[in-house]
Amino acid sequence: MIIESSAPTRVDLAGGTIDIPPLFLFHEGAATVNFAVSMLAHCRIETRDDDRIILESIDQKQRFETTVAEIASLKDEPRLELLSKLVYFFKPNQGFHMTTESEAPAGAGLAGSSTLNIACIGALNKLVGDRYTPDRFIPIAAAVECQVIKVPTGYQDYYSAQYGGVACIHFSPAGMEREALDIDVATLERRIAVCYTGEPRNSGTNNWELTKRHIDGDKELFDLFDGIRDTSLNMRTALLANDWNAVGEILVKAQPQRKQLSPNITTPQMDHLIDTAIANGAIAAKVCGAGGGGCIAFYCEDGRRSEVEAAVAAQDGAQILDWKLNTDGLTIILTA
């Protein structure tokens, strides 16, 4: 039996960090807005006739083996830690070879690890006979990833990975609710360029520093998170109205807000790339994820995306990423 799964990465437009529990509980109306992109994370599981378990990551160039009888050892296995903890959680009772690969660069700020998490959960759940219904995938993903990075993790990334499309994720004491946004997809794709800076980053570390300051009662930070919430809700309204001028204005105002929240969100190289893009037809820049490296999404003047991409691609270390909106979300194919 072969199980092949894939899930899309994402670009976050507004509301990053406020999706980390318990932060959203202190900001009524908290929400994030993102869209899934066609750079996928893949998981392939092929069952074996023996009790060997082989875990392999093509991206990390790592591979190791264990057995069904030794699954308990995966609880604290440092090699391919996410995969190990997921296999430990599901505890399959048969041998298999699990291979993973991501199309997005490592540390890109496109939710690569969270996306891979969802892809692996989909495949492993199929391996154990659909033990969990799909509505359980996101809570499982968040819990296991927290075990890996050892700090609370935000939730928005799992929704884009599992469901795809453009969405606003609403957070409240009653729970989380995904609202699919019906927008002009052609304009979104025509006006947003995505650049990988070549500088990977660790979002868990950046976000945990902000979470601790918030919990410690930093009043200035609390007010900034209120502003992040308002930016998300305004972005939702603008997208639903297909008001692309408003989208640009919101992104222009949001960048200084994010910079105030985390001064290290951009590096000198990122600042140079942003300046280059603005000089060649970009209206605004949105640092993806927690920043400090990774990717930047540039919102371009209509018809000038190619100019922005050409100017940015000419800079050392920069790489333009080809993308389309992904509306499929998590896909799982079972071959007997």
Image (spheres, rainbow, N blue to C red):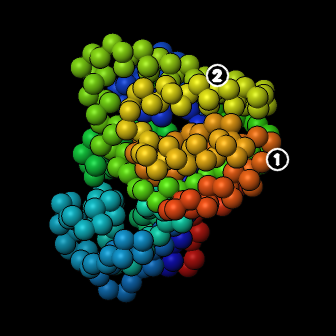
- Report how many numbered discs are placed on residues in the image: 2
Which percent across, then down, holds residue 277? 64, 46
Q: Secondary structure at mark 1?
A: loop
Amino acid type of the residue that numbered disc 2 sits on in the rendered structure:
Asn
For residue 36, say whether it is visible.
Answer: no
Q: Which mark is residue 234?
A: 2
Q: Which mark is residue 303?
A: 1
Which percent across, then down, holds residue 138? 45, 45
Q: Is residue 211 above or below residue 81?
A: above
Amino acid type of the residue that numbered disc 1 sits on in the rendered structure:
Gly
Q: Is residue 299 above or below residue 41?
A: above
Label 1 environment density (alpha carbons within 10 Å; few <14, some 14–19, many ≥20): few
Q: Is residue 323 above or below residue 268?
A: below
Label 2 environment density (alpha carbons within 10 Å; few <14, some 14–19, many ≥20): some
Residue 157 is left or right of residue 48, and the answer is right
Q: Residue at x 69, y 51 (%)?
A: 308
Of residues 283 and 209, which is closer to you in this image?
A: 283
For residue 52, say whether it is visible.
Answer: yes
Q: Is residue 101 above or below residue 26?
A: below
Which percent across, then down, holds residue 145? 34, 49
Q: Secondary structure at mark 2?
A: helix
